[in-house]
Amino acid sequence: MSIPHQHSDATRESLGRSVRGILFLAFLFFLNFLSRIIFAPLLPLIKEEFWLTISQSGSLFFFISAGYFISVSMSGFVSARVNHANTIFLSSLAASLALFLVTFLPSFPLFCAGLFILGLAAGLYLPSGLSTIYTGVPRTFLARGIAIHELAPNLGFIMAPLLWLAASFFLSWRQCLMTLSAMLLFTGVLYRFSSFPSRAKGVQPDLKLIISLGKDIRFWLLVYFFSFAICSTLGLYAMLPLFLVNNHGMTADTANYLVSITRVCSLFTPFLGGWLGDRFGNTKVMATILICGGMLTVWLGLSSGILLIFLLTVQAMVAVCFFPSGLAVLTSFSLDDRENVAVPFCIPIGFVVGGGVLPFVIGLIGDVTSLNMGIVVAGIAIFGTGIAALFLAHEILAERR
């Protein structure tokens, strides 16, 4: 009778250690993510300092995303040689140095080049981080394990404006970036020498695999879905401070504070998304979230006053629920009897499109008409993606059971 009890205790201890490891990893991911999105609350200041148009302001995130795309795509070559633990450490070190470098760049072209290097450095993290979770968490808890990891970007959305508001009393925006650089480096070192990192090596991508992925309709559907899911979170978030300042007459501090507090509830809703994915099927949840998020984004672009604040809150709460289910499907993607092969390709393309190209497009529409219209158009596109997912995901993105 004692054997089941001992087995249960061992299982709980193993699961508890997995959770502690994910939390440590999530904090490192938080700093990694913060190093890229901190430029959203800084955007009004950067726009003024470099005399930028709205579309040029949006292009900053394209340069970060372009570097991110290349780095995530090539991360398999790094992790296959130095293992996931060292890849995560290398990403932290390089991102810290790149962020420090950015603070000394005096012109807009050089600043864009620095952001591209920052994206290159930060992008090494994600495939190794997700692989660490995928190999260290029981399959029945995979979506919820990813939901814990997803605390990082959701907390980043909340804290980036608040940290800048607090730091702005004592530091310039360049000194703020230096401080973040130091924190990222210190945490990366701590993680590298802890007992949590995975010493397993990654899978080096090969030409045959890339060609096979390029021919697989399931892969391109995942890219399509992730691109607009990222637009509904990161892409929209990047333009919100500018939207609130230009179209609703707010000060930069008020806009940043509002963007921050309206995302507090979205810190917790990914857990609901993870539970719904485990309960009802991840592909169904992905489609539903995109449809609801698209409708809310359209309404957001047309609203003002109290309704605007309400929609900023609800849209963020709904949009982040996509990722526990989306990442569970993505990490389970198999091809030619190889698992977890889509992450290094789908995620970077999604970030370039959803976190770089689409904010730039929103900015272009803002230059021609208004940012309100740019957000409405983005919402219509997100809604259409959800409809496509509803009809196509069940047949083509069949989940492994």
Image (tube, helix red, strand yellow):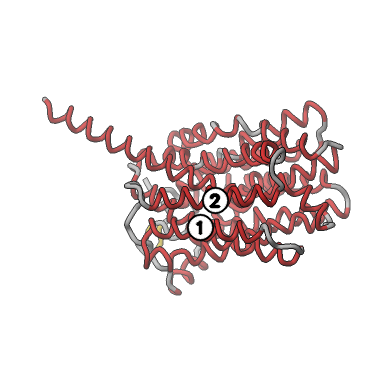
- Does 238 appear above or below 267? below
Look at the numbered disc 1 and give the secondary structure of its residue. Answer: helix
Residue at the limit of the structure toward the bottom, as seen here: 207
Residue 113 appears in view: yes
Say whether residue 30 is left or right of residue 335: right
Camera-side residue of 172 and 5: 172
- Amino acid marked by disc 2: Ala
Whole-percent x and y of residue 87?
Answer: 43, 60
N-term mark: 1 or 2 = 2
Labelled disc at residue 182: 2
The image shows residue 224 at horizontal and vertical percentages of 60, 55
Q: Residue at x 49, y 54 (%)?
A: 126
Quadrant showing the N terminus: top left
Is 268 positioned to the left or the right of 84 in the image?
right
Residue at image point 80% right, 53% down: 47
Apparent side of residue 343 relative to residue 379 in the rendered image (left or right):
left
Foreground mark, 1 or 2, reads: 2
Say which mark, if any, is on residue 218.
1
Tell me where residue 308 appears, x and y as whole percent: 77, 31
Q: Residue at x 51, y 57 (%)?
A: 218
Can residue 292 be seen by looking at this rendering?
Answer: no
- Residue at image position (59%, 60%) is 98
Circle 2 sits in a helix, a strand or a loop, which is it? helix
Return the mark for residue 379.
Answer: none
Residue 13 or residue 28, whichever sits in front: 28
View extreme (left): residue: 1
Determine which quarter of the picture holds residue 88: bottom left
